[in-house]
Image (cartoon, helix red, strand yellow):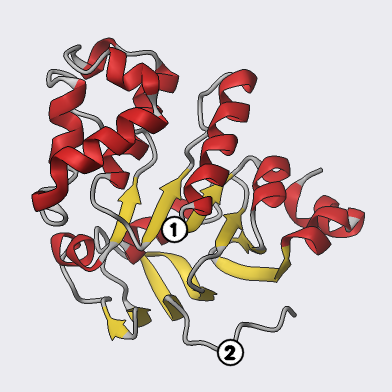
Amino acid sequence: MIEPPASEPLLAVNGVHAGYGGSEVLRGVDFAVYAGEIVTVLGANGAGKSTLSMTISGVIKSWQGSIRFKGAAIERKPPADIVAQGLIHVPEGRRIFPNMTVRENLDLGTYRRARSRRAANRDRVFAAFPRLAERQSQRAGTLSGGEQQMLAIGRGLMAEPELLLLDEPSLGLSPLLVEELFALIKGIHAQGIALLLIEQNVVQSLEVAQRAYILDNGCVVLEGPATDIEKDPALRRAYLGL
C-alpha cells in the first residue's frame, strides 16, 4: 500500500455505502485525494464508478460512511453547497445545455462560485480551448462530441475548482481526441488543481495519475502507485481485463 502524504486529505471517503432503492452499489468504499494529486478510480462497467462520483458530489446520498472535503463533512450537503466549496463534478455524458451558446454554458459554471471573476476565467478557458473561443456564439448542441467534452470541462474550470472530478471524460471520443484530452488533464494538473479521474481508459489514466484505486463490485479491491499497477501484469489481468 502506498504511504499517504503527511497532510490531511483534500477529499477523504471512508466506509461509504450507497445505491438506488433497495439495491446497494457501493459497499464500504475508502479512498483519499491529496492536494495537487491526480488520483484515478478504475473499473469495468457496473463496478460502481459513476455511483461513486454522484455520491461524492451529493447527487446521490450515501447510506452509510463519511465524505470529507477540506476537513468538513459533505455527505449530507446538497450539490450546490459542495460546488460552492470548490469540489466540481464534470459528469459522464457531458450534460451541456444544447440550446444555449458555448459562452452561456461556460458562464453557468460560475452560478455558485467565482462569479465575480467570470470574464477572466472565461478568457482562461478560451486560451486553453481555442476551438471554444472560435465557437463561443454557437449553440452547444451543434458541437462535435470532442468539443462538447471540452465545453463540459471548461464549464467546470469556470468555478475555480480545488478538486475537479471527471467522470468518464474519454467516453465516446476518437483515439486522437482521447490523446488530446489526457494532454489537457496534464495541463490542468500543472495549474495546481487536484483531479479525481474516474475512467475505463486504463492505460492513459495510469500514465497521468500518481495513485490509483481499482473498484470491483462496489468495493476497492486494490490501491497503490499508478506506476506499480501499470507494470504488474497479474493485477492488470485480474482487475482490469488487460
**Residue type for callout 2:** Ala
Label 2, on which residue?
6
Quadrant containing the C terminus in the rendered view: top right
Q: Which quadrant holds residue 180?
A: top right
Q: Is residue 213 left or right of residue 25?
A: right
Dot 1: within a 10 Å radius of its alpha carbon, few (fewer than 14), some, or many (20 or more) residues?
Answer: many
Instruction: Pinpoint residue 225: horizontal percent, then vertical percent.
Output: 74, 67
Instruction: Pinpoint residue 33: horizontal percent, then vertical percent.
Output: 51, 71
Label 1, on which residue?
193
Question: What kind of element bears circle 2?
Answer: loop
**Mark 1 vs mark 2, CA separation in Å:** 19 Å
Q: Is residue 228 above or below residue 149?
A: below
Residue at the location (14% across, 37% down)? 107
Q: Which quadrant holds residue 6?
A: bottom right
Q: Nearer the viewer, residue 125 or 53?
A: 125
Q: Is residue 68 left or right of residue 34?
A: left
Q: Is residue 50 above or below residue 93?
A: below
Question: Extreme right residue here?
Answer: 233
Residue at the location (18% across, 14% down)? 139
**Residue type for callout 1:** Ile
